[in-house]
Amino acid sequence: MFVFKAISFLPLWVLYLMTDFLFLIGYYLIGYRKKIILNNLRHAFPEKSEKEVRSIARKFFRNLTDSFAEIIKSYSITPQELDKRVKIINHHLVTESIEKNQVIIGLQGHFFNWEWHLLQMTANIEKRCDVVYAKVSNPFFEKLMMSIRTRFGVTMVEKEAFQRDFLRKRNQPRLIVLAADQRPGNRDIRYWTPFMNRDTAFFEGAEKLAKRFSHPVIYSSVSKPKRGHYVFTYEMMDQPPYEGKPEHSITDRFIALLEDNIRKKPEIYLWSHNRWKWKKGT
């Protein structure tokens, strides 16, 4: 871990030179998850030519390797540099809710660079932030990512412990962040609905939580104006009272916003994940 910390003090442009080499090796020689990436893109964008699909795949892979440089830099990046590189628009939706002693739920997809999003939030805007995450199986990388993510005060909550943790802190005003586009486990309760031209399973935990305890829900869309710079825009998805609103209303709204974000910026979405592993009816 000392090596990662030492490397992180290099200028970001030097780290990008390293990951440029990694991009060439990973995409053109090894072809890391290339079959999954291309298959996902072909299903998601049937209207695009093979040339267009492969262009998105290359851009995605460069963003993926760029994110490695950015994660390493996260060890030493200052709040001042984060503030120059990461903009959060409408963050008042979070701060005002917390000032009113509310819990607010934030939903996002797996877009680059979600790690910097969390760091910017807790470094410069609001430290009362819980992030629900899936534990990494490799102990070294679990420790590495935990030390990076918690630098500025965020609280990481393993998803298996989230329900218990939430009930214990039910009356503590804070932001709860969930990446709600993850593939549910095969035994999890799932909601099936069309997404990117395929029947797709989604968690509904965020909706059930929001409606049961009357919490507002925001969505964070993402854009990447240039290398090493990100803009996250918050918008209110729904808020109480929820009485009379249809089942799946929050989940459906999240899916619509997520798909719109993907179609506008497909190259920054995580296509290497085998999102459609489970099939409806299995």
Image (cartoon, rainbow, N blue to C red):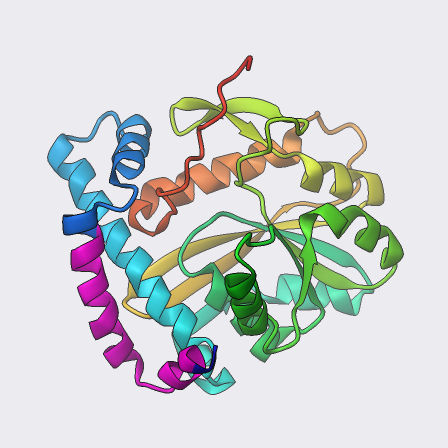
- Where residue 168 appears, x then y in whole percent? 88, 56
Q: Tell me if 128 is positioned left or right of 181 in this view.
A: right
90, 186: nearer the viewer: 186
Residue stretch rendered in magenta on the structure: 3-26
Q: Residue furthest top?
A: 281
Quadrant for the C terminus, please.
top right
Residue displayed at 83% across by 64% down: 101
**Magenta-span inclusion, residue 14:** yes
- Where residue 241 appears, x then y in whole percent? 80, 41
Residue displayed at 46% across by 49% down: 110
Residue displayed at 70% across by 25% down: 247
Count of marks placed on residues = 0
Quarter occupied by residue 201: top right
Q: Tell me if 92 is positioned left or right of 3 in this view.
A: right
Whether residue 89 is visible, yes or no, is no
Residue displayed at 39% across by 29% down: 196
Quarter occupied by residue 43: top left
